[in-house]
Image: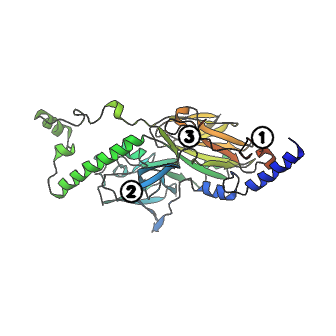
Amino acid sequence: MTRRDFLITSAALSAATLLPGSLFAETTKKENSERFPRQLEPVMEGDVKTFRLFIDIHQQELVPGVRIHTLAFNNQVPGPEIRVNRGDKVKVYFKNKTELNHTIHWHGMHVPWRMDGVPYITQMPVMSGQEFVYEFVAEPYGTHFYHCHWGTLLHMQSGMYGSLIVEDPDDPIKKRFPYEREYTLLYSAHDLNFLRNELNAMLERMKERLYLVRNGRFDKERFAVFDSKEELEGAVRKGYQPPYVVSRRAPAELAQPFWFTVNGKSYPSTPNLYIREGESIRVRLINSGTEEHSLHLHGHDFWLVCDDGLPLPQPWQMNTMRLSPGKTLDIIIEGKNRGIWTFHDHDTRRVTNNGLYPGGNLMALVYEDLPEEERRVMPMKGMNNLIPKVALDE
């Protein structure tokens, strides 16, 4: 590169870092901060922290050009983050604004069994227009999440999930790894055809069922809800055919995800993890979907410090981990190798959008104090020299 070319490149780089599209611009970092769950602020009722959640149908943009209908807590996917201290008394008012039934299950939490959110086991489903109040003491410490437990196959991939963090002022992780900031990532997987067809079918079924309930024509066989196993067996002997006998779908019609999201977004709309040289960050990973992910970080080993919210007696150092459905894992990343590093699923089928690579849960670990001279690359004809680029087809 000639001195003239170097000066031109340097000037272009300096100007570009001020543009919103630059990875290092303050506007970009501010926008990135909005790609993480928003914290839901409590209202105190005496010594009880109270929260209000509602569920409604909401449009969510996965990537530019792709919007879907979801079932969203407080019109957010994922739902708002609930943060409490260990031992806090918690009350959650849950309002159902849809025409479908719902509950909330507090995944990983030691709640009273009546608060566990399993329909027909611990509570009746929360029907359209109804409100249910969940009350519990925040235990145990760690990274947990909440999700709907009605029509779970559909409702969870429709967006009904959110993070629940139970903190401890005497944080055992921060004692060993004094991190300065943290990030929450919720992974999910979506079959958009399944979502659209099943949501429409379920809304039609629920309209019929609500009509029958309002007119006093509740029919146990039509609703497939019986008071006991013996009552079900008696109905079968009389000729009743349960829904699993008259199957509504074949195995091929079950959800086959082809969109993969982090915090409700697919690449290139996924969030970045910003870090500085010498800094440690804590990343809370939650698998609120149906697919297993093999998450790999380039250029670093990280410390696995919590499994299902529980601090590990001996943290493990690794660069690839398995995040199974329903699991939560906490990791510490130490800023020891500055650059722009890929953080992605090594099962690259999960790093696609509608079958096209790159996409899905592709993310980046970005050193925000990366010197300007390390951001330069030889420019391609017709493109500036800033990296990373947004690639939609490799």
Which residue is depicted at the point 65% across and 53% down?
A: 181
Q: On the picture, is 43 further left or further right than 5? A: left
Of mark 2 and mark 1, the one earlier in the sequence is 2
Residue 55: image tag: 2
User: Which residue is outermost to the front?
Assistant: 382
Is 311 drawn above or below residue 206 in the view shown? above
SS at circle 1: loop
The disc labelled 2 sits on which kind of residue?
Ile
Secondary structure category for the residue under label 2: strand
Amino acid type, residue under disc 3 in the picture: Gly
Residue pushed farthest right? 3
Residue 190, image quadrant: top left
Other-residue count near label 1 (Cα within 10 Å), few / some / many at <14 / 14–19 / ≥20: few
Seen in the picture, residue 329 relative to 204 is either above or below; the reply is above
Viewer-side residue, 128 vs 351: 351
Choose between 43 and 286: the one closer to the eye: 286
Q: Which mark is residue 359?
A: 3
